Image: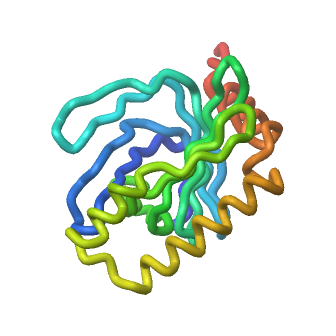
Amino acid sequence: MNIPVGTLVTVQSYKHDKTLHRIWQEAKVLSDTEECIIVANKRTKVIESNGRFWYTKEPSVTFFYKNRWYNVIGILKTTGIAYYCNLSSPILADEEALKYIDYDLDVKVLENGQIVLLDQNEYRRHRVQMDYPAEICRILEEESLHLQELIRAKAEPFRAEDVEKWYQIYLRSQEVVPC
């Protein structure tokens, strides 16, 4: 299913046991290719599984991969671009939303390029509680290493100009054209 550029979509993340984890209420599709769906948003409402909600503080551009077990969020901060990467199932698009399974492990890249691995304890706990298959664990470990290689190499999408280019496209799509 290809999503037309400019479409507003909802993003839903689930846990391995099929429970809803988090919902991003709105993101605009900037690109949908065989490899990746790119979306952007600014001050979007995020609803947690317990019903609590919050709004994103900074604008972001997210790269959802169709054949990789991660997604990458480029966050435009006043001090530079930070990246937050979720180890997750490949993205699935249906009529309802963009959907993926969040496998707990996260890789954060600070504006200075420092790589921080997050939520390893949560991953170990959920791996047992939700009985992650060994094959998925192997894939997640390989994808985490691959992701870190991309970050160190400053390969797409880990170049500021990539995120800034897509954010400019998003901003232009937000402009109101007079009648």
Question: What x and y, as percent, mark residue 133?
Answer: 34, 83
Question: Horizontal placement of 127 versus 83: left or right?
Answer: left
Quarter the C terminus occupies: top right
**Vertical placement of 178 versus 159: above or below?**
above
Residue drawn at (35%, 34%), measured in percent from left and top? Answer: 46
Question: What x and y, as percent, mark residue 3?
Answer: 54, 56
Toward which corner of the image does residue 124 lie, by quadrant? Answer: bottom left
Residue drawn at (52%, 78%), measured in percent from left and top? Answer: 139
Toward which corner of the image does residue 28 lie, by quadrant? Answer: top right
Question: What x and y, as percent, mark residue 101?
Answer: 37, 63
Question: What x and y, as percent, mark residue 14?
Answer: 31, 58
Residue situated furthest top in the rendering? 178
Question: Horizontal placement of 22 versus 38: left or right?
Answer: left
Q: Which colour scheme is used?
A: rainbow
Question: Horizontal placement of 174 versus 43: left or right?
Answer: right
Residue situated furthest bottom in the rendering? 135
Residue situated furthest left in the rendering? 50
The answer to which of 26 and 156 lies nearer the viewer is 156
The answer to whether residue 5 is visible is no
Toward which corner of the image does residue 127 lie, by quadrant? Answer: bottom left
**Vertical placement of 33 versus 85: above or below?**
below
Residue drawn at (63%, 57%), measured in percent from left and top? Answer: 32
The answer to whether residue 139 is visible is yes
The answer to which of 77 and 45 lies nearer the viewer is 77
Q: How many labels does the image show?
A: 0
